[in-house]
Image (cartoon, helix red, strand yellow):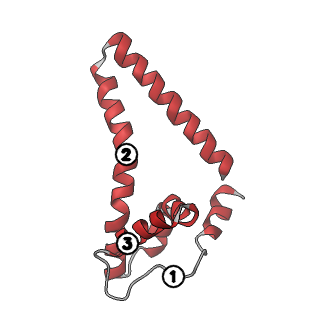
């Protein structure tokens, strides 16, 4: 998984540099909008984590989907300093059903074996 993350990071950086060249040298409008969208997608992904948790905690539908889609958020929560872990857990519980919490310890790591072959 570390290799996949490194390759993704390098590809993302290369894409942003390529777009920067298109914006600066050619002043192309589509490149500006593409850069805005590219930089806003990670923010929107992180922001959607909380509502996904809240909805699944109340309707009990889609829990496996949330576990797969938000695997990177779970990984970040697991390896980050305690204040980031607390923030992610707090955000996942703001609008959730009373008594709901993440359970099962690190079972989500089994998904990485399936998807990344680690």
Instruction: Say which residue label 1 marks.
Output: 103
Q: Point out the tag, 3 or 1, that comes first from the N-terminus.
A: 3
Furthest toward the right, the residue is 118
Query: Residue at 58% of width from left, 35% of height from top?
Result: 10
Task: Kindly report which numbered mark, 3 or 1, lies closer to the viewer in this rendering.
Answer: 3
Query: Residue at 40% of width from left, 22% of height from top?
Result: 20
Disc 1/disc 2 C-alpha distance (Å): 28 Å
- Placement of 106 over or under 14, stated as above or below: below
Instruction: Say which residue label 3 marks.
Output: 90
The tag on residue 41 is 2
Q: Position of residue 5 (x, y in %)?
A: 60, 47
Query: Residue at 49% of width from left, 72% of height from top?
Result: 64
Disc 3/disc 1 C-alpha distance (Å): 14 Å
Q: Position of residue 89 (x, y in %)?
A: 42, 71
Q: Point out the tag, 1 or 2, that comes first from the N-terminus.
A: 2
- In the picture provided, is 47 more to the left or to the right than 66? left
- In the picture provided, is 56 more to the left or to the right than 68? left
Front-lying residue, 88 or 81: 81
Task: Kindly report which numbered mark, 2 or 3, lies closer to the viewer in this rendering.
Answer: 3
């Amino acid at each position: 998984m570390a290799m996949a993350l490194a390759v993704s990071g390098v590809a993302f950086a290369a894409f942003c540099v390529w777009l920067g060249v298109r914006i600066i040298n050619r002043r192309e409008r589509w490149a500006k909008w593409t850069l805005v969208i590219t930089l806003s997608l990670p923010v929107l992904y992180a922001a959607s984590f909380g509502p996904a948790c809240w909805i699944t905690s109340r309707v009990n539908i889609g829990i496996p989907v949330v576990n797969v889609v938000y695997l990177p958020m779970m990984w970040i929560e697991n390896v980050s300093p305690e204040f980031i872990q607390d923030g992610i857990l707090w955000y996942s519980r703001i609008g959730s059903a009373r008594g709901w919490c993440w359970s099962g310890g690190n079972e989500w790591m089994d998904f990485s074996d399936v998807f990344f072959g680690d």
